[in-house]
Amino acid sequence: MNLGDSAVAAAASAAGLSGPSIVVRPLGLTGDSAFQGVLEPLRELPAASMIKVPLAAALTALWAAGERRPDDRVTIAAENMTPNDAESPLVPGFRASLEELGRLMLVRSDNVATNTLIDVIGRERATEFASGWGLLATALRRKLSGALPLIDDPAASGRNAHPAGDAAHLFELIARNQIPGSAWLREMLAAQEWNAKLNRGLQPGDRFAHKTGDTDEVSHDGGILELASGRRYVIVVYTTLSSSRENDARFGDFMCRLRPFLDRG
């Protein structure tokens, strides 16, 4: 284990992050000596709402290919309704634009928008896009449920998969404008409404375009971090912590411990 990996592991342990799967990677020029570290990047953990980022990327790829347009409208179906952390503005029969659905999915983590986009894009198509971008362990297999019982999903074929290592790779592609719609995706991630985890450990002037994922089994956060100094990183933290305010604070503690390393190099 190199020094960066050791520092990441130590910070995770001290912060009480259970079952961590972590990637910290600089976005500087080739050969940049900036801090980096990884910890079990391909650990198999439920993806939770982190799966919404590759689904959103598939959506923008369809826009770029001309197969769909952002202003195309789709009717919200009753079978896609499920609870959300914040009340969804979507109701059965409402006709939403694809851009509106993508925005709600990333900014508010809206599960109804997500399930509707799964119908529009298709699970296999979304997974094919992910594979083409090198996300070889990522698969869209089922719709999302905001609470038990799980949503009725006859086409489900197992759990969604999107490990921390794949999430970090996708964030890097988005940061480097290497997939269609990168600018829109960054804008949506920067507008994230759920900012109670890694954001707690940031310093004034830092900017974090990110996505979170939470269930009663896991708690995740990850995205593109630009420091006040101008340095940029991809940071992804997956854990086996349950979703709670206390556990959100552990992410902030981890970032506080990690943050001094990030301006070095």
Image: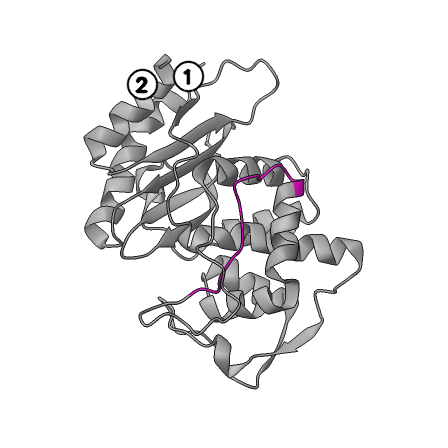
Residue in the foreground of this view, choosing between 149 and 181: 149
Q: Nearer the viewer, mark 1 or mark 2?
A: 2
Q: Residue at x 59, y 59 (%)?
A: 123
Judge from the rendering whether residue 114 lies leftward or rightward of residue 198; answer left or right.
Answer: right
Residue in the foreground of this view, choosing between 252 and 23: 23
Judge from the rendering whether residue 138 lies leftward or rightward of residue 263; answer left or right.
Answer: right
- Residue 254, can we see it? yes
Above or below, 161 against 118 in this view is above
Residue 225 magenta-highlighted: no
Q: Residue at x 53, y 55 (%)?
A: 140
Q: Residue at x 70, y 65 (%)?
A: 70
What element does badge 2 sit on? helix
Question: In what quadrant of the picture does the C terminus appear?
Answer: top left
| CA–CA distance in space, label 1 to label 2 | 16 Å
Q: Residue at x 73, y 58 (%)?
A: 63
What element does badge 1 sit on? loop
- Residue 205, can we see it? no
Instruction: Report the number of discs.
Output: 2
User: In the rendered structure, which segment of residues is drawn in magenta?
Assistant: 132-144
Residue 140 magenta-highlighted: yes
x, y (%) of residue 175?
59, 37
Question: In what quadrant of the picture does the N terminus appear?
Answer: top left
The color scheme shown is one colour
Looking at the picture, which amino acid does disc 1 mark? Arg
Judge from the rendering whether residue 242 lies leftward or rightward of residue 188; answer left or right.
Answer: left
Residue at image mark 1: 264
Looking at the picture, which amino acid does disc 2 mark? Ser
Residue at image mark 2: 6
